[in-house]
Amino acid sequence: MGVITKETALAYGVTGPTLRGSGVAYDVRRQEPYSVYPEFTFEIPTREAGDCLARYQVRMAEMEQSLNIIEQALDHLPPGPIRSKVPRFVHPAPGRLLLHL
């Protein structure tokens, strides 16, 4: 609930929305790109306050950025039908309990 300053966040190795809520624009998808993230355009949401509200606002803004990335990924899919190779039946190993939810 308390304020985490930029300096404190960096000193303690804070990551994710907590770090960005303290004003540090660090996102591993940008700093150490992997997979197809370099092909996408997205912002790194930050807030300067370092409090609980700032962390919440960063999380909300990150959901918007995630939707932006999903839309870009969908735009890059090749035309035509897409089918994943998912088994139609899943058989548990002998002795394993199959839970029904």
Image (cartoon, helix red, strand yellow):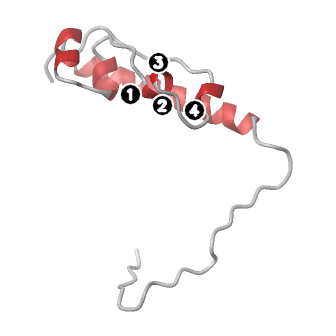
- Viewer-proximal residue, 88 or 57? 88
Q: Residues within 10 Å of mark 4 (few under 14, many from 20)?
A: few
- Please tell me which of labels 1 and 3 falls first in the chain: 3
Q: Amino acid at mark 2?
A: Met
Residue 45 horizontal/vertical position (percent) = 44, 17
Q: Are marks 2 and 1 in contact (CB under 8 Å)?
A: yes
Kindly identify the residue that appears in the image at 60 percent across and 26 percent down.
38
Residue picked out by circle 1:
59
Label 2 sits on a secondary structure element that is helix
Q: Where, by quadrant of the figure, is residue 10 drawn? A: top left
Quarter of the image where the N terminus is located: top left
Residue picked out by circle 4:
67
Label 4 sits on a secondary structure element that is helix
Residue 74 horizontal/vertical position (percent) = 71, 39
Q: Amino acid at mark 4?
A: Leu
Residue picked out by circle 2:
63
Q: Amino acid at mark 1?
A: Arg
Spatial separation of the CA atoms under disc 2 and disc 3 = 11 Å
Q: Amino acid at mark 3?
A: Ile
Residue 69 horizontal/vertical position (percent) = 60, 31
Q: Can you say whether 75 is above or below 18 in the image? A: below
Q: Report the side of 5 relative to 19 (left or right).
A: left
